[in-house]
Image (cartoon, rainbow, N blue to C red):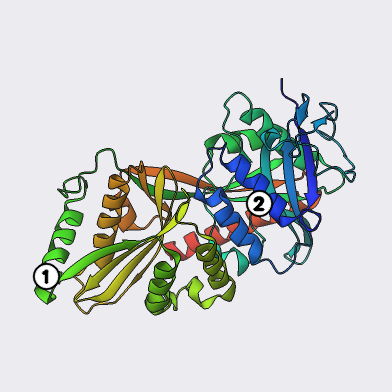
């Protein structure tokens, strides 16, 4: 059985160019989606105000002799070095391993919080910060980055979670994973001797295997078919419309800047204002687009609808080898509510996914009606909290239960009266 060495390394001690090289090497041997690519992770790290209290958890195969990046032979540490318990890193902790020896990565941000005035907790957030502004970039399909090898990745995954949850040096009170869609992850985490709290969210995606761009009857909802057909006719009545799509950073960024006002307007009176009002959000996407390499398999996409040569809608998406992910849309408001520009853009983006042999057009998390009508598959996302078995957490849970019970009782009494 593989017994990987697990290391926890402060990001401030980890040269970023080395981490990028190692991350990309493992990503190319993984089943990771866009949200675990260096495109995303590197852009996220670029908006962090400091690397203090940020930790890289790395799994390395030390079970055999091999060569390092300088092609010299290394006698690796014993199998169990650092696998469990406290492992003190020496000066060679980052050296002496070939890129192919890397088996797993995760980056955790540590925060200290106080809830209800009496609950103190040291939290570790996987690929998030715990800061609402910095986390508005909305990572999804969040998980550890693991080598794509069914014989060993479960062992690596288990070793990492066991180590992070039992390490006496760092010892977080709570570990949070948002938004995960790995069904096996919840089962694994539940097997740990910890309290696990999960909050479930629904997402949707459309398989392209049965999607025929020549007909709308691929959609189950008859109203959706009618709305898309009517939108095409109404747009033609207003002049002429065309669809363009671009992956070059300059065009994508330009289209977003020209249309972000519509996104800001749509969300300004809600509990979640547009990310375009958040400087960290803007900085993240500027870096994501600047870093973007059109020759890369992991990229960005802007699908643009023009009416009489003027932009009236943009779908901003990401894509990898398997899917196109819908991230956000900037849509011009029309007085005629029969114009469903958003649905039309989704239809054409699905067409691109089909033409480029992507298996799915993925709407990501969110239980909006239009997503369910345009999709044929549900995806379950979860926010997972792993808690130490501490009295203060039991007390918090008990008081929360009492509060909710009283609230429900009062509400039922009010309804009867």
| Residue farthest toward the front in the current orientation of the protein | 71
Q: Which residue is mark 1?
A: 236
Task: Kindly indicate the quadrant of the structure image that contains residue 164.
Answer: top right
Which sits earlier in the primary sequence, circle 1 or circle 2?
2
Q: Position of residue 143 (x, y in %)?
A: 59, 44
Q: What residue sits 76% from the left and 45% below the top? A: 388
The residue that appears at 48% across and 59% down in the rendered structure is: 412
Residue 91 at x, y percent in the picture: 89, 46
- Tell me where residue 417 sits by quadrant: bottom left
Which residue is outermost to the top?
1
On screen, residue 77 versus residue 137, left or right, reads right
Residue 312 has which mark? Answer: none
Q: Name the quarter where the N terminus is drawn.
A: top right
Whether residue 313 is situated above or below residue 152 in the rendered picture: below
Front-lying residue, 130 or 347: 347
From where the camera sits, is residue 366 visible? yes
> How far across and down, in percent of the image, does residue 222 sit?
16, 51
- Is residue 261 left or right of 209 when viewed as pictured? right
On the image, numbered disc 2 is attached to which residue?
20
Q: Secondary structure at mark 2?
A: helix
* Circle 1 SS class: helix
Residue 281, horizontal then vertical, whole percent: 55, 70
Q: Nearer the viewer, residue 417 or 249?
A: 249
């Amino acid at each position: 059985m593989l017994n990987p060495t697990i290391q926890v390394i402060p990001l401030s001690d980890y040269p970023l160019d080395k981490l990028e090289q190692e991350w990309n090497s493992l990503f190319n041997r993984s089943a990771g989606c866009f949200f675990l690519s260096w495109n995303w992770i590197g852009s996220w790290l670029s908006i962090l105000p400091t690397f203090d209290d940020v930790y890289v958890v790395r799994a390395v195969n030390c079970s055999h002799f091999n060569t390092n990046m300088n092609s010299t032979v290394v006698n690796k540490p014993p199998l169990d070095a650092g696998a469990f318990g406290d492992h003190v890193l020496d000066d060679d902790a980052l050296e002496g391993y070939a890129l192919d020896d890397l088996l797993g990565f995760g980056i955790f941000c540590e925060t200290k919080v106080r809830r209800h005035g009496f609950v103190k907790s040291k939290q570790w957030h996987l690929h998030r910060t715990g800061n609402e502004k910095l986390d508005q970039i909305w990572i999804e399909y969040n998980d550890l980055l693991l080598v794509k090898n069914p014989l060993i990745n479960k062992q690596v995954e288990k070793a990492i979670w066991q180590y992070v949850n039992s390490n006496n040096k760092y010892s977080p009170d709570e570990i949070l994973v948002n938004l995960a869609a790995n069904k096996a992850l919840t089962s694994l985490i539940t097997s740990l001797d910890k309290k696990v709290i999960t909050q479930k969210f629904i997402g949707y995606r459309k398989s392209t295997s049965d999607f025929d761009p020549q007909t709308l009857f691929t959609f189950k909802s008859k109203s959706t078919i009618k709305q898309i057909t009517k939108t095409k006719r109404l747009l033609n009545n207003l002049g002429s419309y065309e669809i363009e799509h671009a992956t070059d950073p300059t065009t994508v960024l330009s289209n977003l800047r020209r249309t972000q006002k519509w996104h800001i307007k749509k969300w300004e009176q809600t509990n979640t204002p547009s990310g375009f009002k958040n400087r960290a959000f803007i900085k993240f996407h500027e870096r994501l687009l600047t870093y973007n390499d059109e020759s890369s398999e992991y990229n960005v996409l802007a699908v643009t609808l023009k009416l009489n040569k003027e932009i009236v809608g943009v779908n901003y998406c990401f894509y990898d080898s398997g899917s196109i992910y819908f991230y956000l849309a900037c849509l011009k408001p029309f007085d005629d509510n029969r114009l469903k520009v958003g649905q039309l853009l989704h239809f054409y983006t699905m067409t691109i996914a089909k033409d480029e042999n992507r298996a799915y057009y993925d709407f990501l998390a969110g239980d909006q009606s239009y997503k369910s009508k345009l999709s044929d598959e549900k995806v379950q996302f979860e926010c997972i909290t792993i808690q130490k078995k501490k009295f203060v957490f039991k007390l918090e849970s008990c008081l929360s239960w009492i509060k909710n019970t009283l609230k429900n009782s009062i509400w039922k009494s009010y309804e009867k009266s």
